[in-house]
Amino acid sequence: MPADNPPTGLSRELIALRVARELEPGSVVNLGIGLPTLVAGFVEPADHILFQAENGILGYSGVSESDFDADLINAGGQPVALVAGASFFDTADSFAMIRGGHIDAAVLGGLQVSARGDLANWYVPSRGGGSVGGAMDLAVGARKLIVAMAHVTRDGEPRIVEVCDYPLTARRCVDVVITDLAVIDVSPSGLTLRETAPGVSVNDVVAWTGAELDTSGPVCEMPL
Amino acid sequence: MPADNPPTGLSRELIALRVARELEPGSVVNLGIGLPTLVAGFVEPADHILFQAENGILGYSGVSESDFDADLINAGGQPVALVAGASFFDTADSFAMIRGGHIDAAVLGGLQVSARGDLANWYVPSRGGGSVGGAMDLAVGARKLIVAMAHVTRDGEPRIVEVCDYPLTARRCVDVVITDLAVIDVSPSGLTLRETAPGVSVNDVVAWTGAELDTSGPVCEMPL
Amino acid sequence: MIAEYFDTPDDAIADIADGATILVGGFVSAGTPSNLIRAVRRSGRRNLTAVANNIGLGDLLDELCEDRQLAKVIATFAIRASGTRSSRFEAQYRAGEVELELVPQGTLIERLRAGGAGLGGVLTRTGLGTMMAEGKQTMELDGEEWLLERPLRGDVALLKAWRADRLGNLQYRLAGRNFNPVMATAAELVIAEVEEIVEPGEIPPDQVGTPGIYVDRLVQCEPIPVRWEG
Amino acid sequence: MIAEYFDTPDDAIADIADGATILVGGFVSAGTPSNLIRAVRRSGRRNLTAVANNIGLGDLLDELCEDRQLAKVIATFAIRASGTRSSRFEAQYRAGEVELELVPQGTLIERLRAGGAGLGGVLTRTGLGTMMAEGKQTMELDGEEWLLERPLRGDVALLKAWRADRLGNLQYRLAGRNFNPVMATAAELVIAEVEEIVEPGEIPPDQVGTPGIYVDRLVQCEPIPVRWEG
């Protein structure tokens, strides 16, 4: 039985840092709105990671609130700066890039992830309506999909579940889930615990995860 | 019965001139390879007709052999000059323009036109293989399709026929046929003779046309 | 073919009809025809369908809800996931006073592109197995499943560009392109607001983002600033 | 992500395999990777499928027929309507030594775009009721008939641009774009020949025609002139 409250895990910033470490040098990465946006602040410049914004930018270097230009924003509406060698394009070309498999990795927020890698991240049933943005295209198009989210809801319900009960973003699309408590790999055979956050035990993660989790392999503490 | 040889009609240049007169001032026009290309030389600059080349130019003013730039050619491979306000785009955008109905008129050469407006212009059965280029897209996409061609083949066979026996470019696509002998309108109800070339009689045109031709309306001599 | 100038955005949109479908370019603050949207608000036109990336993110489109001018919205961002801030659109949506068709962004742009490019539809994997596929045709081809998405067009498109010339050629700046170039191809009447109008030839031919043949009307305005409200 | 430089076009294409499908950018003389085509000829690779706008119009692609390197050609211009001039391709085609798939130009580019953009196909009216529709699926939607065209991709794309930077960003000049930007999206390996290589940032971000992430290899060459033989 889980304790009443999950253990204290990583801050949002540390989740973003851990996601940044997951990105391959030289890769092309799209960051979703919210927590994923923070990732841009944690990559090493020497790694030459190129960020794509689905509103039509390849090669923004990060959020730059000081100097707002209405025409130079990322997909979260935040002002950004450019790297040398950046390019602009329209939405059709941007989603050709995304849907066509030309983005190495996407980092999306999540509401629920299922044992087989289904993602739900765009529709809160209690609120309805929803905002989907580019999430469904990124989920089917990105070569690697990293979901960055809190391990449980504010009400203490696991977000990693056997089957999503929230409406899906896409089926079998998630490769890795990075939460405040753990790094979990998703494969056709299910979920595998790879890392735990500092101060968090394997048993903690199992207790707050709503799906079967393979903990038999080597599990290490997150390198931060 | 037709005479052994058709009457002498317009030269290729005069056909091109007559086609030029058919174009609306301010319209956007695509000229096919061969005879249609000559049309660019006969439009009035004051009419501000804008020529589109399907290889990615809007606003070329005509062929300019004197100054060959390999990257500045029309769809017939001929070097062209630009008007002020021209633009370049790629083939995808060019055919979005063509197929999407944004070209006011296309002028294509023809091998055969049928009574219901089918066009055959890309495949000579005796030669096989064929070259289609943008003709099929222009035929379905241009708001008005003008076919410019000789009225009969070198062997004296009518090119305007009840049913095309050459492979089609598109069905029911032709609006006007302009030949060395006549201007013929095509509508769902069939072919209507509108004009004859100087020195060519209505009976001549009927004799050398292989489909029923309505000559009951006013028929005038081509204004050249 | 030569674009018509208007002195005010109100004149430029004056003959939009009640019940029209309006494509609205822009992505939050970038490339957004804010003066034209305000003019539609002032026009009092009703029963409109708006097709836009976003509504209710601090954008001016949300103002069209003040007097219930919108009957339907086709968008990718419409209701915030968090309930900490609410838009007029959201309130009307909850009251059942406005219809929402939510569309994935890559599908929205392909539907508009198909509408402008004379295509009858495209096959995408986006949305398969989700609510977005409900009521839509799917096809299996060579063992893969695809969702058929149909074209989308508007009666009017409202665009924003940086500069225009007298022929209607538009030049965008930075990330101001987004939906504008495709929407320019997919409406019966295309109206663009620009910051500057120049002579033909001043926009280099390879920097024309929307060829002038797509643009019917031009109006020169100072953009009205918009910011995303998080 | 950083494009790899090669000293010669021969080095850049050295590992193309026999039997590969090669997308070849360009439209007759404009934006044609003439040095890369010549290098393929020198490589002696055989059983190739070439996808290109044209063959046998004076272009260098026709030279690949000299030693029968092509098994198949997918093109829009292939056999001249008049028999006054003949190409090597035409001779081989008549001898049944090379296969030809003729595709309407607007359909060829949409098939390539679908291949690069992750779309399963598009619906077009182009080709309906013609030989081009033979063996293809048609659909009736809302009373209109459409032809389903499937995606097309290559193992390799050979492109030509004016300038490139170290990241592989390509800038085209004049009408040199044509098939190049779409072909850049639709092959496993993308090789571009350019006239000049510059530092990142020297190509303004809104004048990048092909973002560098699409380009794997670069080689700097003086273009070999080509003219249409009428």
Image (spheres, coloured by chain):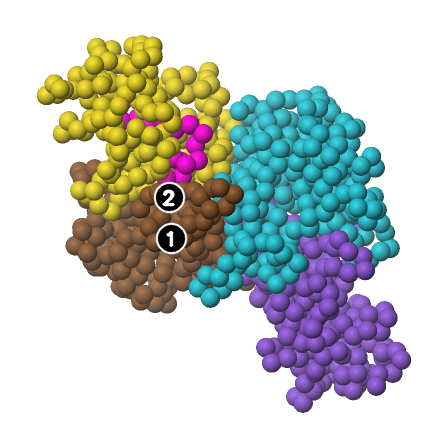
Chain colours: A yellow, B purple, C brown, D cyan
Residue at 79% in and 83% down: B207
Q: Residues within 10 Å of mark 1 (few under 14, many from 20)?
A: few
Residue at 81% in and 60% down: B126
Residue at 84% in and 83% down: B2
Q: Nearer the viewer, residue C144 or B93?
A: C144
Does the image show residue A67?
no
For marks 2 and 1, the one nearer the N-term is 2
Q: Position of residue C29 (x, y in %)?
A: 35, 42
Tell me the tag on residue C127.
Answer: 2
Q: What segment is highlighted magenta in the picture?
A: A136-149
Q: Quadrant of residue C69?
A: bottom left
- The amino acid on which the numbered mark 2 sits, given as a three-letter code, is Gly
Q: Nearer the viewer, residue A197 or B11?
A: A197
Q: Nearer the viewer, residue D16 or D203?
A: D16
Residue occupying the far right of the picture: B4
Tag 2 near tag 1, CB within 8 Å: yes
Q: In the image, is residue A141 part of the stretch drawn in magenta?
A: yes
Q: CA distance from mark 2 to mark 1?
A: 10 Å
Q: Position of residue A117 (x, y in %)?
A: 34, 30
Which residue position holds label 1?
C136
For residue C170, side relative to residue C74 (left or right) = right
Q: Quadrant of residue D16?
A: top right
Q: In the image, is residue C127 part of the stretch drawn in magenta?
A: no
